[in-house]
Image: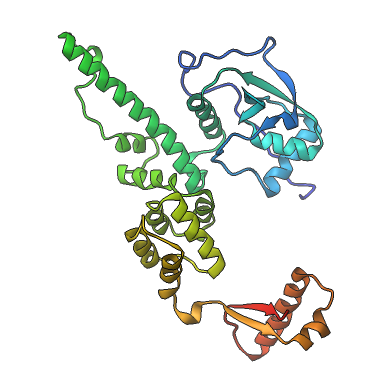
Amino acid sequence: MKANSTKRKIFDAVDLLTEDTSSQMPVKTMKGGVTMLDIDSIKPFHNHPFHLYEGDRLDDMVESIRDHGILNPVIVREIDDGYEMLSGHNRQKAAKIAGLKKIPAIIKYDLPDTDAYVYVIETNLMQRSFSDLEISEKAAVLKERYDKVLYQRQRESIMAEVAKLEGKPLKGGHGDHHFNNRDEVGKEYGLSGSSVGRLLKVNDLIIPLRHKLDNGSLMFKVGIQISFLTEEEQQLVYEQMMELHVKLTMEMAIKLRAHSGDLNLAMVRRYLTKTVDPKDRPMNIKVAEKISKKYFKGKDQKTIDDILEKALAAWFAAEGSADTMIIMLSP
């Protein structure tokens, strides 16, 4: 990091949420509020939906912690074998790099998964705007919001039914309006109900495919088609994508979705290769054994790859353009 770069003021949300959930969360904190915990006793939240800091942003946080310590305690919940992080994954990561062994924490007890997830989502939204989130992160936020709205609608429906059975008017006009839940969730973020629906489907993708959405190597519309496959089928598709070095197209995704429930290895390989232009497929080229021994004896694969890349770049710069190739050394 540059010495003269402006340090970011590092904030993470503490025990504050955008709404009063005290009536929903029967929790208690230890006397004094903050406890110093062994940093390794805190596990990351299961299925944590947000990417952790990297690069300059992480470096800034590490430097801030070294200079000033952790200004805001993390929030954790007690679990059977220690603690689980609710708010503070980045502080914990940076604190470990900074060499800290203990970290200040606010501990929540008897906190169910649904309420714990509210902490994870809401505290992250206090630090970043929705528009700054990656696709998979937006999907996670919308799911939490959608589930909350859906729960409220179900509650109102039950209340209306009970009031009708008892012959009593329902106060507050509940049950008099029919809402499109997706439209209501979308209003908060300037999204249409259909956009919310598509983003919600992202949550049905396996994690490696969500990462491909976020880094741009999987088109959003293609990912939505794949989200209709079972987890096992998605895993099979992902493994074959990586093995065959294939980028999924809409044509491939539509064919895969049409056969969901019946997909096997042979079918997946056929659909992933049949629609690929042969000239766009990687070529496996073997290097003669005498060349391998002469130039690459005793060298590891990374060193060999670097040498080959530089040599090929120099050759093609003089002779022409290179197609995609995978160089395989003879055994």
Would residue 180 be found to the left or right of residue 111 on screen?
Answer: left
Q: Which of the pair 207/173 is nearer the observer?
A: 207
Q: Which of the pair 110/197 is nearer the observer?
A: 110
Q: Residue 59 sits in which quadrant? A: top right
Residue 247 locus on image (x, y percent)? 49, 66
Would residue 48 be found to the left or right of residue 226 on screen?
Answer: right
Q: Residue 313 sits in which quadrant? A: bottom right
In the rendered image, the vertical position of residue 157 relative to residue 133, given as above or below: above
Q: Residue at x 69, y 34 (%)?
A: 91
Q: Is residue 220 visible?
A: yes
From the image, which quarter does the C terminus lie in?
bottom right
Residue 114 locus on image (x, y percent)? 48, 27
In the rendered image, the vertical position of residue 193 relative to residue 235, given as above or below: above
In the rendered image, the vertical position of residue 307 relative to residue 8, given as above or below: below
Residue placed furthest toward the bottom: 319
Q: Is residue 6 visible?
A: no
